[in-house]
Image: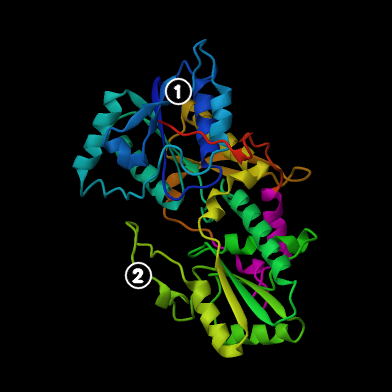
Amino acid sequence: MTENKLIGAAVVGQSGGPTAVINATLAGVIRAALSDEFKGTVTEIYGMRNGIEGFIDGRMINLSEIFTKADGTTDEDKLTLLTQTPASALGSCRKKLPDPEKDPEFFEKLIARFKENNIRYFFYIGGNDSMDTAAKLSRYVADHHYEMRVIGLPKTIDNDLPGTDHAPGYGSAAKFIATEVQEIVRDCAVYTVPAVTIVEIMGRDAGWLTASAALPRVLGGYAPDLVYLPEAAFSMEEFFEDLRELFKKKPNIVVAVSEGIRFANGTYVGEADQSGVKDVFGHKYLAGTAKTLEQAAKAEFGCKVRSIELNLPQRCGAHFASQTDLTEATEAGAAGIAAAVAGETGCMIAILRDEKADGYSVYYKPLNVQNIANGEQKVPDKFLNEKKNNVTDECLRYIAPLIVGEPKIIMNGGIPVHFVFD
């Protein structure tokens, strides 16, 4: 860590898929930047509209002006509303930065924007691909002698960022999924007619979200009968056998599946029902896995089969966020400001569990973003049961602390109030 003081403006952006708490991280950054501790160093804080894509086009807003009251104090009421607002309040993008050596003009334009606004602190809230942006940018400014500190702030409902124990956004999504699937289990249990209900949950390569569907099993509630993750090859024959064994014991079966489960040959189970379209990072848009399994189970058993796709509510259900998740998201944002002012750059703020603490406790540590960008943290094999059709209690005990607590939501006429930038 260097000790040189760097005075200048900061800019913060959000990228990739939104979460229920991504704005809590933004609020943490803003509050810290405007605090008495840092406002003499961070002279102004700007927000990028639609991430780096908007920044390159000059679309910024002055967050210092928006969140400072007439008497010069921070507007905590606005920050509170921002914290409880789902989705990316600044807007998002999925832009992959080019190789600096192949497209230097792009980065030269970026540097010009930074100099134009005296930006010396760059904060990017996002997941794997967003850390790629932070990694490339931090390398470029270092190589071209522009002093600016680049900090990645973790965000992903998929919980697949390496280095960090878990990422803000996951705990709230896990809480929503565990609750929603438990309610589906109760609904399905009212009939005696043989039936299978298949719930499709987000997760391309990592099954953390789908694993959370089983949480009620260790919390005294009702969990799905089967849980299939992308980490294990899926077999239609074994799926049918799992259903047959369960039908001997009960008439109603609930199955949780990740959208990204694949057969042993690597083909997505739902490939026939997918468009094949890819995003700029080469990821296929997934959907249709539960529908494929619905049709297969219906043909095999001739019983009632229903498929349910939880879809976007998994990541935007801020009305039922985890207080633990909200707190950590906010603290990660503040930790980013503190680390940057102290001299850190080219890093991501990781959330790490304090194993020495009595009970669940975390601390924040800057890690080299070059070692994190484009990496992936999957569900370890020890968290899968022997048949690979469910998760272990050890897995659920890891997840359980992340969903604890319910925030007090500001309501109007029975619905939550959201903060929206003009």
Q: Looking at the image, which is closer to me, 409 or 116?
A: 409
Say whether residue 34 is left or right of residue 109: right
Q: Circle 2 is placed at which residue position?
A: 276
Q: Secondary structure at mark 2?
A: loop
Q: In this picture, is 170 found above or below 55? A: below
Say whether residue 325 is left or right of residue 45: right
Q: Which quarter of the image is occupied by the C terminus?
A: top left
Label total for image: 2
Q: Position of residue 110 (x, y in %)?
A: 27, 35
Q: Circle 1 is placed at which residue position?
A: 66
Report the residue that reaches farthest toward the top: 71
Q: Is residue 157 visible?
A: no
Q: In this picture, is 115 found above or below 321? A: above
Residue for point 38% across, 23% down = 9
Q: Position of residue 97 (x, y in %)?
A: 30, 48
State how far apart marks 1 and 2 are (Cα): 42 Å
Say whether residue 102 is left or right of residue 417: left
Image disc number at residue 44: none
Tag 2: residue type? Answer: Gly
Indicate whether residue 383 is drawn in magenta.
Answer: yes
Report the residue that reaches farthest toward the front: 413
- What range is drawn magenta here? 378-403
Q: Cβ–Cβ below 8 Å for labels 1 and 2?
A: no
Q: Position of residue 163 (x, y in %)?
A: 54, 50
Tag 1: residue type? Answer: Ile
Indicate whether residue 158 is drawn in magenta.
Answer: no
Q: Secondary structure at mark 1?
A: helix
Q: Is residue 222 visible?
A: yes
Say whether residue 122 is left or right of residue 364: left
Residue for point 32% across, 56% down = 280
Residue for point 53% across, 78% down = 293
Q: Looking at the image, which is closer to me, 328 or 364?
A: 328
